Image: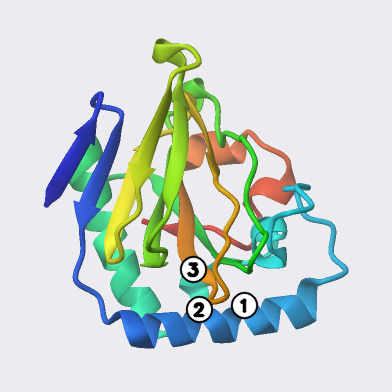
Amino acid sequence: MIIENYYNTLYKVQSNLELPTLKDDCIFLNEYIDYTYSEKKGVYADEKAPTSTKVFNHYNLLSSPSYQFYKLYTEIKKAFTETSGKTENFYIQAWVNVFKKGQQLSWHGHFPEEANAWHGYFCVDAEPSITEYKFSFLGDTITPIENKNNTIVIGKSGQDVHKTVIWDKEEPRITIAFDIVPVEFLQSLDETHYINHWLPL
């Protein structure tokens, strides 16, 4: 169910997952990633980003044996079909973002417009916070997206850059981000982008 539509490019979709269990699974996975991947070089180099974000290209949260992650997968699939109208030959990767006090993501994008890719995130425990977007067709205008727990924010890649504001709470801010990309485009990239961490949607 779409609850907000931003310029027919970005959508907010209501979900109904068991957040306490999902939050526990995210924290457990984040601790494992901190321990296992702290020395890995990730694609995302922002020093204020969590390790789980920096090394997003080394794992796929959706391949973890968690029933709540599986339910999230099905919710993302429904949201993608509802917002994009597309159903075949797309693959997905997902990662956890666990922000501690003082952490944030700076302005960044994901895939170019010609990739026909989508990007989004699910709010596990992200209130109160906003994610700021700039859309290419609006110039430097900033569109703030208010984050509400148990919602999926999903949109077309290539028409935006976005960032989070600095998290200033003691309790962590937890989201799960994802990319949805046509298999043909993935196959055109180098191995760091498509080997071992993509699943069919």
The residue closer to the viewer here, 170 or 163, is: 170
The CA distance from mark 1 to mark 2 is 6 Å
Q: Which mark is residue 26?
A: 2
Secondary element under disc 1, as helix, strand or loop, is helix
Q: Residue at x 58, y 62 (%)?
A: 168
Give the mark nearest the N terminus, 2 or 3. Answer: 2
Q: Is residue 55 left or right of residue 150?
A: right
The answer to whether residue 81 of the structure is visible from this angle is yes
Please tell me in which quadrant of the rendered image residue 159 appears: top left
Which residue is located at x 63 percent, y 48 percent?
105
* Colouring method of the image: rainbow
Mark 2 and mark 3 in contact? Answer it, CB < 8 Å.
yes
Q: Which residue is mark 1?
A: 30
Q: What is the C-alpha distance between the residues marked 2 and 3?
A: 8 Å
C-alpha distance separating marks 3 and 1 = 10 Å
Residue at the extreme left of the image, as rendered: 1
